[in-house]
Image (cartoon, rainbow, N blue to C red):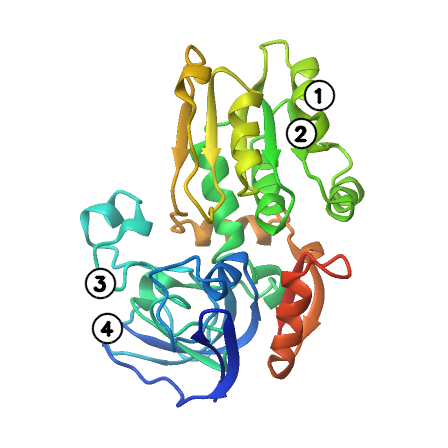
Amino acid sequence: MKAYTYVSPGRFELIDKPKPELQDPRDAIVRITLGSICSSDLHIKHGSVPRAVQGITVGHEMVGVVEQVGDGVKTVKPGDRVTVNVETFCGECFFCKNGYVNNCTDPDGGWALGCRIDGGQAEYVRVPYADSGLDRIPDNVSDEQALFVGDVLATGFWAARISEIKPDDTVLIIGAGPTGICTLLCTMLHRPQHIIVCEKSPERASFIRRNYPAVEVVSPEDCIAAVRSRCSRGGADVVLEVAGAEDTFRLAWECARPNATVTVVALYDRPQILPLPEMYGKNLTFKTGGVDGCHCAEILSLIEQGKIDTTPLITHRYPLSDIAQAYRLFSNRLDGVIKIAIE
């Protein structure tokens, strides 16, 4: 089969690989129908994910059809359309039982697909712990509607949930890339009083204004003044940092009111500094970490009910044979790209 592969730092190639086989009774083999490119894939390519293994097939955002299951798989069967979870989790360890599936203690636990084991920018993928890692797509939900459930949408759902958003809150979301938009959609489910999105890209700011007209959009230069002028409490009640830059990390806590929650969703390329003397007295609560993607069935139900729609994010489509061109478009943010569907 064809598989887009991490050959060496800075170099991905579409090469021929053997079709994956079952290695454990709890495995499933999934034929990929749609995949996508995530910013985390770019982090691997640029050498910013030290645990990524050279030679693996990249990609961890995908939907497909179950082709084969091991004897221990109980929840899916061949022929089922499924979303594939970004995380591998056993469902049995302390962390899994408490919903912290990103910290599953299995050797392949957490983010493994497309990082430490072969992922889904290929024709087929092997999914360990298929009962945990696969969710059946309802018949009236399309592959396009379900494409982001297992990763970027699960991230937005997790981020909004752990932020404990209340109805009278003002919520600031920093960054309107794909993860920021999914975070926005999931924040809207909590119905806060006011949502502000901070975005420097005119194209992405325009995307938010066009698709979500009730949401206020501000530039980074105007963000602090805008938030403080609209928030009688001295800043936003909840700030979600989804941009992942040094200046946006600082902007997040600067825009937060005293005793606010700052949820760090972004993956950074380098360490960030908390200037504690400057922050003294703000009494902020920081929430950070990788997504605990264990609510995919609930997300699919919300999509089925029409409460979440991520299809506007799909701005471009490419066949797997042209995936290198798709990466160039995505990594350089050309032609107004938000997300790409890989067929």
- In this view, the residue in front, 37 or 22, is 37
Cβ–Cβ below 8 Å for labels 1 and 2? yes
Please give the residue where the numbered disc 2 appears in the rendered image. 196
- In this view, the residue in front, 25 or 302, is 25
Residue type, mark 1 in image = Ala
Cβ–Cβ below 8 Å for labels 3 and 4? no
Residue type, mark 2 in image = Ile
Could you tell me which residue is drawn at 49 percent across and 44 percent down? 266
Q: Nearer the viewer, mark 1 or mark 2?
A: 1
The image position of residue 153, as x and y in percent, is 53, 51
Spatial CA span between label 3 and label 4? 19 Å
Give the image quarter of residue 71: bottom left
Looking at the rendered structure, the secondary structure element under dot 1 is helix
Give the image quarter of residue 70: bottom left
Please give the residue where the numbered disc 3 appears in the rendered image. 107
Q: Nearer the viewer, mark 3 or mark 4?
A: 3
Say which quadrant the C terminus sits in. Answer: bottom right
Cβ–Cβ below 8 Å for labels 4 and 1? no
Could you tell me which residue is drawn at 69 percent across and 16 percent down? 230
Please give the residue where the numbered disc 1 appears in the rendered image. 226
Looking at the rendered structure, the secondary structure element under dot 2 is strand
Looking at the rendered structure, the secondary structure element under dot 4 is loop
Spatial CA span between label 3 and label 1? 46 Å
Give the image quarter of residue 276: top left
Residue type, mark 3 in image = Pro
Cβ–Cβ below 8 Å for labels 2 and 4? no
